[in-house]
Amino acid sequence: MCKKRMLEIMGLLNKITEVIGLRILKSGFAIIFATYLAMFIGLEHAATAGVFSILSILDTKRKTLQVGTNRFISALVGLGLSSMLFTLLGYEVYVVGIIVVVFLPLARKFDLESGLQQDCW
């Protein structure tokens, strides 16, 4: 009985993915998961995590993991660099420009470009 029910569910999922597409289905689940995770850890704007999850869904698992890893590393490097420069130079607008001018070539040199917004290049 359980096996029959499982086959029915699999058939239903196949029909759903044929109609709306697997990528859209993955995006829907990603939005739900990311938003609830952000709410669970106490982020103030949890819906933003859902929006970013849409931008992170790619065609294959491998590409998705690669870009996700690059974005995480880029975020850590950017956080470290900006913390250092803001501490040394103060919280001024020109420091943001310096951070961008220093960070983008670093990201390119260490092949973290896929972790950045494409408009930067």
Image (spheres, helix red, strand yellow):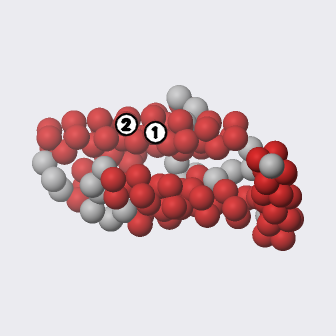
* Residue 84 vs residue 98, the one in the foreground: 84
Under circle 1, the secondary element is helix
Q: Residues within 10 Å of mark 2 (few under 14, many from 20)?
A: few
Regarding residue 113, the answer to whether it shows in the image is no
The numbered disc on residue 72 is 1
Residue 9: x %, y % from top left: 78, 57
Which residue is drawn at the image coordinates 83% and 58% (left, top)? 8
Under circle 2, the secondary element is helix
Residue identifier under label 2: 76
* Residue 116 vs residue 49, the one in the foreground: 49
Q: Are the residues flagged by discs 1 and 2 in contact, CB closer than 8 Å?
A: yes
Residue lying at the far top in this picture: please name it. Answer: 110
Residue lying at the far bottom in this picture: please name it. Answer: 19
**From the viewer's perspective, is residue 111 above or below residue 71?**
above
Residue 23: x %, y % from top left: 73, 58
Residue 39: x %, y % from top left: 34, 58
* Residue 6 vs residue 46, the one in the foreground: 6
